[in-house]
Structures are given as C-alpha cells and as structure tokens.
C-alpha cells in the first residue's frame, strides 16, 4: 500500500527553528550543532543532512561566512492561531512548518481560529515564538455565552474557554437580554487590544443551566445549526415518494429477496439493509442496500446546499440534529419495513469462506421484511434459536465472522470500545450513566458496511480498465511516532511489550497488545491511549489508504442520510457507472475539506455535551469518594477517569499534598521534586469530588488517600501511601465552584 506520512521530521524542524530564531544575522552549522546539544563531531552529520534537506526545499539559504538564514530573511508569517486556555496560542503556518508559540500578552485582538499575521521573535531554546501584528480574517464573529452584570455594565462571558476576555454589550445592543440568560452575540469592530471587545445580542437562547438551552448553546458554540431554514423545510414537504412504477422499471428489483435491517431500537433514520439468498451454484448473494438519497436531493437544490453546508448529522447526548429534514431522513429515505424503497446497492457473490466471486453496483428498489433491534439480532446469534429470519441472521453472521477474522489477520486494528450513555429524566437531568456495549450483531453490520465501502472505493480507485478517476476517499494516515512511543512506554510500565520498530507492521503488534490486556485493569487506559496515538481519519481525493483498517482503498458509501460525503460517493458512482467522464477534482476536494472540518466540529460538540452532562451528574456528588484511573497528564494537573461512571476530572498539581509536583513530558509522568513520587497513566487513585464548574463543564478532584502504580516487570500493582486518608464527605450539600473563579488551566 503506497503511503505518505503527514509528520515532518522533528530534527529538521528543530534546525529550521534555530535558523529562523537567528534572524538576519544567520547561524553557522557549528553554532547550530552546539545550540542543539550535539557536541560530538561524529554526530554533526545530522545537522548537515538537515541543512541539505532545507536547502533542497528552498526553505533556507546560505549567506556570507557560511551563515544560514531562512529564505528571503523572513521575519513575518501568516497562519491560523489556536488559543489554549492559558490565553497563549500557537500559530499553524502549514507546509510542514513548526507551529509558532505566541505568549498571552502578544495575542492582541486575535481569537481562536483567526487567520493572523505575526512577527517572528526569538524564543526559549529551540522554540519559535511570535507576536500577532494583525488579524487578517475572523474565523467567526458569533459567540455563545452567559449574560452577567458587572460594574453597572452588561457583559457576556463566552462558553468557549479559549475566549479569554468578556464581551461588553452596550445598553443599546442588549436587545432584551437579562443577567443569567444564555445568548448568541455578534462581535463588533475590535482593532485595539487595549480596548474591551464589544458585541451585540442577536439571539436569546433561554436561561443558562436549563437542559434544552445548554444543548442549543453547545450547537451554537461550535457553529452548528439549531434548526432548518423555512425554505429548506418547504422544499422537503414538496418531495413525493420516488418509488413509482416508472422509476422502479429503471432499477434492479430486489423486493423478492429476503431483506432485513438491524439498528438501535430508537433509530429513526434506517439507511442500510442486508439481503441474503443462496444461489444455484451454492454461493451466497449478499446485498448491501443503502438509501438512495441522491434520487431525492439533487445537486444545486436548496436541500443539497443545506446538506452540503451541514455535511453531517450531529449526535448530542439526548438528540440527533439531522443533516436532512425529517421528511427525508426519517420517512422517504429511511428503509422502513414492508415499504418499497429506492436504494443504491452493492451486491456480492460470496462463497462459504466469504471470498468475493462476483460483485455488482447500481440503483435498486428493495423492501425490508423485518426490522431488528441489535438486541433481537444478538439473541438469535447467541442462542441460535428459532424466529423469523433466524436462518438469514445466522448465515450473515457466519460470513461476517470470516470477513472480520480475515480483516484482522491482514493488519486491521481491533481497538473497538463502548460508548458512554446517560439516563436522563423528563427534564433532561442525568440520573444514571451506563456503557453501550458492542456485540456480534453490531459486528455483523459493521463487516458488511466495511466490505461495501472498500469495494466501492476499489471500483473507482482500482479500475479493471483505464485510470482511477476523481473520487471521495476516507483516508487514515500513519500514526504520530511520538505518540506511539508514549503508548509503548505505557504498555511497558504494565509489563506488556509493543514492537514499534515498523509502523507498517504496528497494527499486528497493537492487536496482540490489546489481546494481552483484555479483562485487565489497564485495558481501558491502554485502549484510550492507543486511540489518541492514531492520526485522524479525513475525507480526501488523494487516496493514501486507510491505516487503521489496513485497506488500500476505502470510502464512505453506506450512510448518505447522515453524511454528505456518502451522498457525493453515490452521485460519483452513478456518474461513472453510466460512462461519465472525470468529475471536477478541485470541487470534490473542497467538499472533502469542508466535510472533514464539519465532522470535527460535530465531534467536538458531541464531546462538549457529554462533558456537560458528566459535570451535571457529578454536581450532585460533591464530597463523595470514588476510585479512578489516571487518564491524562499535563503541566497543570492529573486527569482521572472514575471507574464507576467513566466521568473525568482534574487534580491540580498544586493541590497534591506533600511535595511540589511537575510534569515531565519526556518521561510522560508527574514527579514530586523532593520525594520522587510519580503519577503515570493507568495509576489507580482514590479521589473526592471537590468542585464542579458548569461554565467550564469541568470537575475538580482532590486526592483522597492511595495510589497504585504499575510495576514495569509483572504488570501487577504496588500500593503506596500518598497522603493521609480523609473521611468521605458524603451527604454534604452540593455546591458549584464560585462564578468567575478559574480552575487549573487546561488546553
């Protein structure tokens, strides 16, 4: 599989940073070596190789007396600034350049995500620093926050913790908002950092703290729509069922083939179905039937433009914000049982070993005979008992098991994981937390969806005749080597081995590690760290393969109701199947980039809703003591995930008694400066819920008594006392952290 890695060479980046920091005066290779700590002459070839690479790329130039400077002597740059919760920021320059650190005092009027011009200045050591001189483009001008009254003025404190300064709302721009309201404001002109940013209230969402208001606020915070425009809803109501006699006559008719759907019991948008029948030659015909959204949503229509803008459905803790209006997502396009439905299908001929003997792609009409909830299908698989369509379910599961086994043998990662779900009362208050478990019925559906996605991508990307044509791929690049090394060290601390010598063979090593830790106390934290070490899958017209699945070709074909790239894939397939020429590559790539961005925003919103409900759940448990596992380490504190309910909170480093603790990034641990006591990922701690800040969606813990730490040889735990055990404060009246009082800084 041909691959590229998106990771720039770290040492070359260090050399480039040092040269840039030297400014117009430049720096010699000898000075570079000394500055980078390379004392041995035999090791200086590393510096020379890095210099040669930078010269070849045209990023540096050689000047007088062997001094190197960045090309053109640039001391300015442009990029996108990411603000962290300390108020400082990092400017992403792109093109493989190292991020530029901007101290809080030098951020100016820049807000998170803005495109800025910066002046490069010297930094500490090899770190490149800069100063914002101008905001070139605002990423957004609308923000969500809570209205407060301060010194006789109305201000709005943004929900986004990366917005450090409150917005002042002039009396004429309050528009009916009162203290305690959650509102959307629009930023006015702001050019001088010495002035307060000013805004005007453009929409009042309701009272802060109310369930629906907070969910709407999260959507607005991440730039996601709260409702459909009237024009879109009107267009949806005007669409009629497309399964007419004329349309059916133009499609492959699959209505007589036994077909089922398997979905969550509360799902309303059923976008995939499976059919099965035995052929005369003894093989199996398996049909993967996907809702034909492309028949209803035509390019350039009002519905299409809205779907393209949203790019994805959004899943918060209590609701789905659909990409398409309900008339389409829950009715016309949803593959309900006992109804003729238009579909786009991938139909495979498989032998008993699930080997593909033939395949067909195209538009069909189908009719689901039975809707299964996952639990119902699971019961058939586990008991192998009798019931409607039990033979089809069992045979599909048998083929899926072979597909899954072969896929993992070929190097697909088997990380998996269960989702954390909340039980909510009638008012939306969390009254319980549980894990949504994955089982054979989920894997059955997953394997056939993966098969369809893979073969559709190969149909275009690896044609039997001609060259590959422009297409939408789902790609997953090589993992970050530094994060992989952290995973290896974590595994070693528990007594497990992870071979990281070859990134291409790493999936097999990771799968072996995950097999070894199954059922152990460290399973959760190692799985979590494994996921964090992986690159983010994105949409692209450049096919670099899918590392995690070990597929050379992969796309998203199976969920056009909730993902816009799938709709683009359906259109492209229909176009190419009818003999159409190459599609516009640049237009497809723009759609891919936008869809990837919107997917990230939707994912961030989902996490924010989970964090909010976790904080709300823990608000009633202040003073109670829980057992947890260290899930993250930073320069400001130790994150702990509670075993009982999977809620996460922070122990500030300043709040750990008995020593001054610091985070050592190289060893990825928190260490006491006097005692040498250590906190590492996977350590077991007992913590007490200290405070909950609903504005920050954050839970603060205090260390209660004991810590257990993995031993590097056996994988067992040793216990050692950290602080005197304190009595549990159960029964104390819950209290929220005082408003305006910031907790430990977080990125």
Image: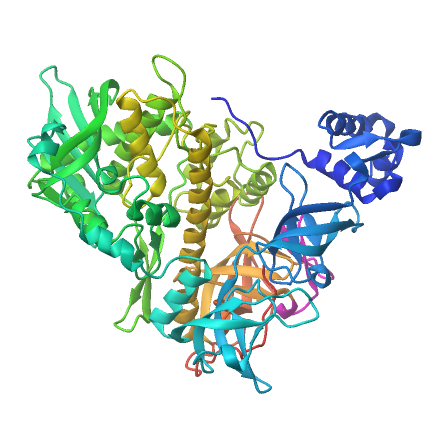
Dividing the picture into quarters, in which one does residue 499 lie? top right
| Left or right placement of residue 34 versus residue 236 in this view | right
| Front one among 73 and 691 | 73
| Front one among 584 and 97 | 584
Residue 441: percent from left, percent from top: 23, 41
Residue 157: percent from left, percent from top: 53, 73
Colouring scheme applied when the structure was drawn = rainbow
Q: Visible in this render: residue 549?
A: yes
Residue at (75% x, 51% y) in the render: 119
Q: Look at the image and tell me in which quarter the C terminus lies.
A: bottom right
Image: 651 above or below 321: below
Image: 200 above or below 16: below
Residue 721: percent from left, percent from top: 59, 64
**Within the magenta stretch, is there residue 662?**
yes
Q: What stretch is highlighted in magenta?
A: 654-676
Residue at (64% x, 37% y) in the render: 96
| Front one among 702 and 614 | 614
Q: Seen from this angle, which residue lies furthest bottom? A: 152
Dividing the picture into quarters, in which one does residue 731 lie? bottom left
| Left or right placement of residue 618 versus residue 190 in this view | left
């Amino acid at each position: 599989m041909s691959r590229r890695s998106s990771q720039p060479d770290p040492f070359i980046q260090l050399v480039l940073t040092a040269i840039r920091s030297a400014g117009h005066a430049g720096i010699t290779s000898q000075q570079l070596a000394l500055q980078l700590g390379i004392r041995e002459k035999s090791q200086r070839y590393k510096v020379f190789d890095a210099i040669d690479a930078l010269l070849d790329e045209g990023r540096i130039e050689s000047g007088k007396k062997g001094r190197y400077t960045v090309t053109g002597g640039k001391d300015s740059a442009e990029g996108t600034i990411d603000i962290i919760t300390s108020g400082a920021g990092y400017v992403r320059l792109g093109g493989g350049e190292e991020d530029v650190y901007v101290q809080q005092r030098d951020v100016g009027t820049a807000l998170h995500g803005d495109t800025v011009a910066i002046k490069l200045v010297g930094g500490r050591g090899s770190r490149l620093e800069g100063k914002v001189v101008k905001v070139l483009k605002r990423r957004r001008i609308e923000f969500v926050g809570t209205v407060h009254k301060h010194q006789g003025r109305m201000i709005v404190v943004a929900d986004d913790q990366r917005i450090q300064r409150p917005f002042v709302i002039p009396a004429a721009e309050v528009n009916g908002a009162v203290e305690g309201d959650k509102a959307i404001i629009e930023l006015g002109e702001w050019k001088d950092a010495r002035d307060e940013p000013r805004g005007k209230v453009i929409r009042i969402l309701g009272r802060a703290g109310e369930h629906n208001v907070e969910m709407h606020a999260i959507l607005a915070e991440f730039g996601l729509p709260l409702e459909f425009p009237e024009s879109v809803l009107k267009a949806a109501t005007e669409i009629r069922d497309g399964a007419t006699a004329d349309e059916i006559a133009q499609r492959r008719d699959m209505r007589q083939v036994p077909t089922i759907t398997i979905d969550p019991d509360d799902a309303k948008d059923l976008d995939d179905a499976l059919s099965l029948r035995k052929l005369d030659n003894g093989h199996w015909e398996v049909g993967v039937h996907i809702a034909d959204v492309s028949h209803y949503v035509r390019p350039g229509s009002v519905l299409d433009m809205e779907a393209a803008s949203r790019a994805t459905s959004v899943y918060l803790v209590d609701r789905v914000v659909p990409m398409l209006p309900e008339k389409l997502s829950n009715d016309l396009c949803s593959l309900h049982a006992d109804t003729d439905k238009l579909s786009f299908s991938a139909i495979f001929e498989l032998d008993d070993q699930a080997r593909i003997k033939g395949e067909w792609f195209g538009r069909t009409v189908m009719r689901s005979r039975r809707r299964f909830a996952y639990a119902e299908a699971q019961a058939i698989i586990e008991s192998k008992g009798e019931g409607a369509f039990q033979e089809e379910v069992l045979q599909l599961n048998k083929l899926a098991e072979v597909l899954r086994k072969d896929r993992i043998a070929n190097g697909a990662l088997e990380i998996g994981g269960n989702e954390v779900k909340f039980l909510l009362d009638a008012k939306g208050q969390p009254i319980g937390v549980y894990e949504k478990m994955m089982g054979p019925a989920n894997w059955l559906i997953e394997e056939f969806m993966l098969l369809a996605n893979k073969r559709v991508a190969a149909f275009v990307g690896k044609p039997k005749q001609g060259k590959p044509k422009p297409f939408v791929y789902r790609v997953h690049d090589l993992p970050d080597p530094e994060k992989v090394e952290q995973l290896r060290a974590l595994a070693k601390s528990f007594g497990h081995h992870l071979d990281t010598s070859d990134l291409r063979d790493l999936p097999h090593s990771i799968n072996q590690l995950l097999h070894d830790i199954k059922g152990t106390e460290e399973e959760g934290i190692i799985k979590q760290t494994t996921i964090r070490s992986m690159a983010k899958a994105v949409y692209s017209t450049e096919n670099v393969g899918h590392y995690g699945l070990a597929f050379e070709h992969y796309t998203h074909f199976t969920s056009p109701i909730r993902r816009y790239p799938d709709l683009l894939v359906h259109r492209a397939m229909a176009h190419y199947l009818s003999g159409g020429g190459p599609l516009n590559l640049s237009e497809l790539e723009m759609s891919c980039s936008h869809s990837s961005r919107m997917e990230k925003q939707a994912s961030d919103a989902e996490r924010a809703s989970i964090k909010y409900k976790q904080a709300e759940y823990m608000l009633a448990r202040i003073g109670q003591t829980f057992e947890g596992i260290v899930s993250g380490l930073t320069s400001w504190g130790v994150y702990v995930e509670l075993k009982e309910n999977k809620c996460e909170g922070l122990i500030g480093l300043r709040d750990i008694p008995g020593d001054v603790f610091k985070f050592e990034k190289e060893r990825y641990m928190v260490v006491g400066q006097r005692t040498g006591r250590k906190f590492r990922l996977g350590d077991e701690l007992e913590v007490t819920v200290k405070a909950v800040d609903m504005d920050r969606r954050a839970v603060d813990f205090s260390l209660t008594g004991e810590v257990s730490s993995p031993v590097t040889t056996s994988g067992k735990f040793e216990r050692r006392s950290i602080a005197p055990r304190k009595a549990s404060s159960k029964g104390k009246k819950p209290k929220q952290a005082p408003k305006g009082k910031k907790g430990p800084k977080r990125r």
